[in-house]
Image: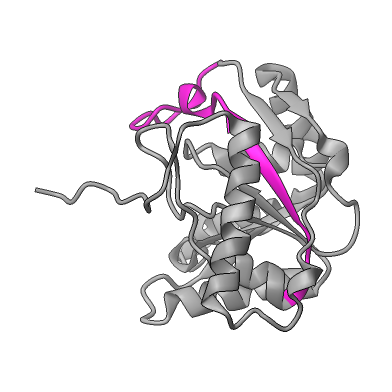
Amino acid sequence: MLTVLIRWVLAPLARLVYRPTVIGAENVPLDGPVIIAANHLSAVDTGVIPLVTPRKVAFLSKAEYFNQRGIKGRFVAAFLSALGYVPVDRANAHTALAALTAARRVLDADEAFGIYPEGTRSLDGRLHRGHTGVAQLALSTGAPVVPVGLIGTDAMQPIGSRIPRLARITVRFGEPMHFTRYDDMASSPAIRRAVTDEIMYAILELSGQTYVDHYHERPKAA
């Protein structure tokens, strides 16, 4: 019921209010496993991508959001599930492995999985070096990767803002990228890096950002 409400009522209403410009949505395969790999500018990105993608997209979410008690907790868990969020215990010592396992379950079910290769939001607006988890997923599952460039979402919900503002945003979907030429080579760090860099370059062309060849690190608390 919640999935129907979100897909046929809330999503069209949000598109009507925010009027995002969407380019290349036809590049997203309508069936079969697919990895949606995007740049990450704002907390609202995970809401924007499913809003404009022609199929449900699953993203990872903190497990504690699904484990809250009471009626409110059950509603939050049901709502997040309807949005496509997949719980992952980030307090686990093997968080990275748990995240890849959860993502693979989505792809093995022939569904779409969304990922930000940078690993975190860009605080300076630039596109940073991608982590190789996206390549690991693509190589181990054979799923195509659709690169996505988000533009303007940092103005829609700036850092520190709780409520999205009216702002011009653009979502550009690139053509699916296939890496079957690297079959049975997922264990090679060099291949994973090469595939990740190829994906990041495609995202760069779509987003128009400045690229910096190092991982993004959040400032340490004083």
Determine whether, in the image, residue 206 is placed left or right of residue 74.
Answer: right
Rendering coords of residue 71 (x, y %): 54, 59
> Can residue 200 be seen from the camera position used here?
yes
Residue drawn at (70%, 43%), measured in percent from left and top?
A: 50
Position of residue 48 relative to residue 176, above or below, is above
Position of residue 72 relative to residue 51, above or below, is below
Give residue 126's quadrant in the image. top left
Say if the magenta span includes residue 104.
no
Residue drawn at (88%, 63%), measured in percent from left and top?
A: 32
> Can residue 103 be seen from the camera position used here?
no
Between 201 and 145, the one lying in front of the other is 201
Give residue 185's quadrant in the image. bottom right
Rendering coords of residue 23 (x, y %): 78, 28
Callout count: 0
Determine whether, in the image, residue 32 is placed left or right of residue 9.
Answer: right
Rendering coords of residue 121 (x, y %): 43, 44
Q: Which residues are magenta?
A: 141-166
- Hey, which residue is sitting farthest left in the picture? 222
Rendering coords of residue 161 (x, y %): 38, 28
Determine whether, in the image, residue 90 is placed left or right of residue 103.
Answer: left
Between 148 and 68, the one lying in front of the other is 148
Residue drawn at (15%, 49%), measured in percent from left and top?
A: 221
What colour scheme governs how the chains and residues are painted in the rendered image of this protein? one colour
Between 186 and 53, the one lying in front of the other is 186
Residue drawn at (49%, 55%), measured in percent from left and top?
A: 130
Determine whether, in the image, residue 13 is placed left or right of residue 8.
Answer: left
